């Protein structure tokens, strides 16, 4: 019967083209607004590394002195760690993998006289960083793990930088001039742009990933500057880079990979023991001193990657869709009641109320589907508009298959809900009224 | 096979109660051709609608082929209507944007016949009314008499035991009316029970039995002439 109902729906559309067009436009407009907002919101909160998001943990320590808390977070924990804490925690062998991480940057001085020097953001990390975050290499590999202990001037670069400087050729073994030093290229990674940029939410959740990665062990050697946040709470005299390394300034991040619940538990115990130890050393003097582990999703929630404003916007867009659907209900009623005489005939010829109801819901579904497709097309325009307005949202303005399916499902679902009342009304009409007067 | 006992039907508005049928009782046997006459507003169409289960009733009981209609739900009534009853209306009630084939197809779709059987039945029904060559025509391309013949084909395609006709010749000229009546008589002779509401005394005279309804109550006349004279007058 579905094929038959689809045929009747098509005839019905041909009979009332303007009414149908109005409904398709109303649904399309509602879907486009909803999908534009929902796409941005969905991609903001999407798991950026689904296969490992539960095994990667960001470490936080409450290290403020009593009454010195100036954190912006709800629980008072600072987002980042001090250099001494990161160095201490890095001694633990419990994590399967671990990496220190600092946003930094360099002046890149190309060998070719045709190219002018340029500034490029970079990241100081440990070798595990690439395996932890599943970053694919196209040439070479990461540096030897020993480099994390005894610094060497090696570098992994991104594909875009390799294309720019070496025209996409294998540049492993070549040298790269960063600031005033030469670094040997050991690997080239493929394009890698997690959205959100979960490994460093402090410095722009949707900013571009870095294309220069150097060993964290170079920090004390080359005195690499921080290009990210530096938060202090203690009055300290900082006259040199070494002073900063010894200070209570929070400016470094730390990630660990813990693959089993037992490992997580063991690491929590380790952190608790570390807090106790530091208290005994009278470095952590506040009773609130504690450690905290957040996996990727928890860390995104903690950082409110999807802001309350975005959620409110999603709510408003659904309200707009509801307004469009309420208009559609009126148009559907008008369309269906025009067909009441035909329904009377069908009832007289043996159609049950249920069959009339289903026939009209199929009719609504077809209109909803057309509205959904129009909404998808208009939604693409909406996303292009978002892209033009907010360049940092570039990673968030595409619809993947899931979102396309969600758009169709919302269009069909909302149309069916809107069609319930008109379909119910028409199936309840008394056929005898129309059979005599048609 | 069709038995109504003390059927009551009241139409209510906020201000008025109209008794369309009062203690209406009737029996129609298999193969009969019954003409129903009566003045306007006497309850003829209400009777026909209740017979076809398009209207519910407020009292009494109605047995159709040993089934108590008042005990059936909408689905069962629709099924019974589809299987046992064919309708013919004064204004034909063909669906304007379906061609003849698809119009005749409507009751067969709800019956659940397979495509092959539907096709055979449609072609046979249209052949029976002399319109097999115009399967793809739309109703608007036919004359009134031809449209009514299509409506008859649609009513017959499911081989119902009852044919309910509400003023089947009311919109036709006398020549076409005679042709349609002739067709109905042939159908009746082949075993289908026909109940026909009409204002036309000549047509009523051609039925085997006449029911005269006045103020929602039935009078069953064997001797038709005095009544028909009154109607004609």
Image (spheres, grey):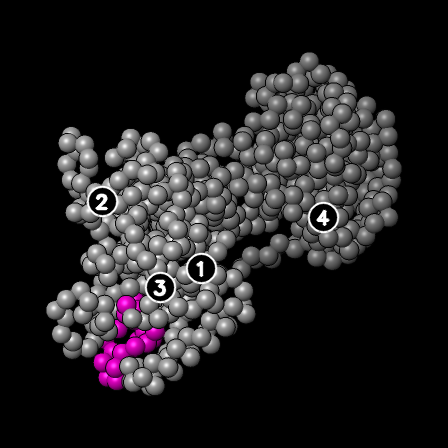
Q: Is residue A77 magenta?
A: yes
> What residue is at 56 percent from the left and 21 percent from the top?
B140
Q: Chain of mark 4?
A: B
Label 1 or label 2, whichever lies nearer to me, is 2
Quarter holding residue A165: top left
| Residue stretch in magenta | A61-83
Secondary structure, mark 2, is strand
Q: What is the crowding at mark 3: few (fewer than 14 residues within 10 Å), some, or many (at least 20)?
A: many
Q: Could one spot residue B201 in this view of the protein?
A: no
- Residue A254, labelled with which disc? 3
CA gap between label 4 and label 1 equals 67 Å
Q: Chain of mark 3?
A: A
State the CA–CA distance, disc 1 to disc 3: 11 Å
Name the residue beneath numbered marker 1. A97
Secondary structure category for the residue under label 4: helix
Considering depth in this image, is B59 or A153 the residue closer to the camera? Answer: A153
Q: Return the residue nearer the eye: A240 or A279.
A: A240
Left or right of A391: which side holds A27? right
Q: Give the CA separation, mark 2 to mark 4.
A: 85 Å
> What residue is pinned by disc 4?
B75
Mark with earlier residue (3, 2): 2
Same subunit: marks 3 and 2: yes
Front label number (3 vs 4): 3
Q: Which residue is identified by label 2?
A: A182
Measure the C-alpha gap from mark 3 to mark 2.
27 Å
Location of residue A324 in the rendering, given as x and y in whole percent from the top left corner: 39, 48
- Residue at 29% x, 64% y is A252
SS state under label 1: strand
Dot 2 crowding, Cα within 10 Å, few <14, some 14–19, many 20+ = some
């Amino acid at each position: 019967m579905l094929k038959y109902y689809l045929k009747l729906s098509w005839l019905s559309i041909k009979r009332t083209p303007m009414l149908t067009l109005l409904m398709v436009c109303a649904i399309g407009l509602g879907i486009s607004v909803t999908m534009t907002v929902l796409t941005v919101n969905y991609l903001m909160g999407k798991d950026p590394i689904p296969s490992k998001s539960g095994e990667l943990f960001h470490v936080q320590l409450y290290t403020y002195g009593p009454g010195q808390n100036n954190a912006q977070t709800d629980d008072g924990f600072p987002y980042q760690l001090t250099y001494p804490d990161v160095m201490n925690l890095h001694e633990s062998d419990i994590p399967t993998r671990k990496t220190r991480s600092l946003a930094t940057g360099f002046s890149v001085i190309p060998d070719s006289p045709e190219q002018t020097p340029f500034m490029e953001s970079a990241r100081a990390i440990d070798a595990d960083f690439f395996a932890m975050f599943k970053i694919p290499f196209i040439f070479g590999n990461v540096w030897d793990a020993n480099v994390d202990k005894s610094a060497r001037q090696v570098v992994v670069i991104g594909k875009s930088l390799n294309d720019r400087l070496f025209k996409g050729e294998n540049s492993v073994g070549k040298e790269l001039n960063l600031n005033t030093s030469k670094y040997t290229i050991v690997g080239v990674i493929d394009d890698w742009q997690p959205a959100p940029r979960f490994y460093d939410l402090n410095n722009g959740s949707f900013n571009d990933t870095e294309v220069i990665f150097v060993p964290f062990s170079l920090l004390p050697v080359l005195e690499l500057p921080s290009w990210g946040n530096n938060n202090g709470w203690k009055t300290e005299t900082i006259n040199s880079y070494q002073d900063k390394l010894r200070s209570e300034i929070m400016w470094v991040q730390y990630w660990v990979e813990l693959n089993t619940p037992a490992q997580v538990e063991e690491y929590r115990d380790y952190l608790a023991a570390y807090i106790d130890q530091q208290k005994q050393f009278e470095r952590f003097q506040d009773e609130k001193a504690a450690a905290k582990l957040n996996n990727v999703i928890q860390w995104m929630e903690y950082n409110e990657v999807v802001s309350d404003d975005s959620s409110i916007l999603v709510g408003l867009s659904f309200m707009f869709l509801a307004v469009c659907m309420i208009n559609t209900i009126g148009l559907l009623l008008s369309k269906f009641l025009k067909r009441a005489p035909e329904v009377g005939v069908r009832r007289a010829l043996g159609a049950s109320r249920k069959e009339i109801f289903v026939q009209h819901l199929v009719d609504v579904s077809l209109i909803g589907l057309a509205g959904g497709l129009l909404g998808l097309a208009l939604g693409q325009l909406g996303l292009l508009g978002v892209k033009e307005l907010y360049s940092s949202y570039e990673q968030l303005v595409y619809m993947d298959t899931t979102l396309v399916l969600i758009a169709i499902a919302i269009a069909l679902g909302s149309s069916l809900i809107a069609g319930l009342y008109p379909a119910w009304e028409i199936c309840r009409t008394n056929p005898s009224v129309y059979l005599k007067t048609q | 096979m069709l038995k109504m006992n003390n059927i009551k039907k009241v139409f209510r508005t906020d201000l008025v109660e109209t008794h369309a049928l009062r203690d209406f009782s009737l029996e129609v046997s298999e193969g009969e051709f019954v003409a129903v006459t009566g003045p306007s507003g006497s309850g003829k169409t209400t009777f026909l609608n209740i017979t076809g289960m398009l209207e519910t009733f407020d009292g009494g009981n109605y047995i159709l082929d040993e089934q108590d209609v008042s005990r059936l739900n909408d689905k069962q009534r629709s099924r019974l209507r589809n299987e046992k009853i064919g309708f013919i209306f004064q204004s034909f009630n063909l669906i304007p944007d379906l061609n003849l084939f698809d119009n005749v197809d409507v009751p067969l779709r709800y019956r659940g016949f397979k495509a092959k059987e539907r096709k055979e039945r449609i072609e046979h029904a249209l052949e029976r009314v002399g319109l097999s060559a115009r399967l793809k025509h739309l109703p608007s391309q036919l004359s009134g008499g031809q449209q009514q013949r299509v409506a008859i084909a649609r009513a017959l395609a499911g081989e119902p035991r009852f044919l309910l006709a509400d003023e089947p010749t009311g919109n036709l000229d006398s020549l076409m009316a005679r042709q349609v009546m002739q067709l109905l008589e042939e159908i009746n002779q082949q075993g289908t029970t026909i109940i026909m509401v009409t204002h036309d005394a000549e047509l009523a005279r051609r039925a085997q039995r006449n029911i005269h309804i006045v103020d929602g109550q039935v009078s069953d006349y064997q001797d038709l002439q005095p009544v028909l004279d009154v109607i004609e007058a």
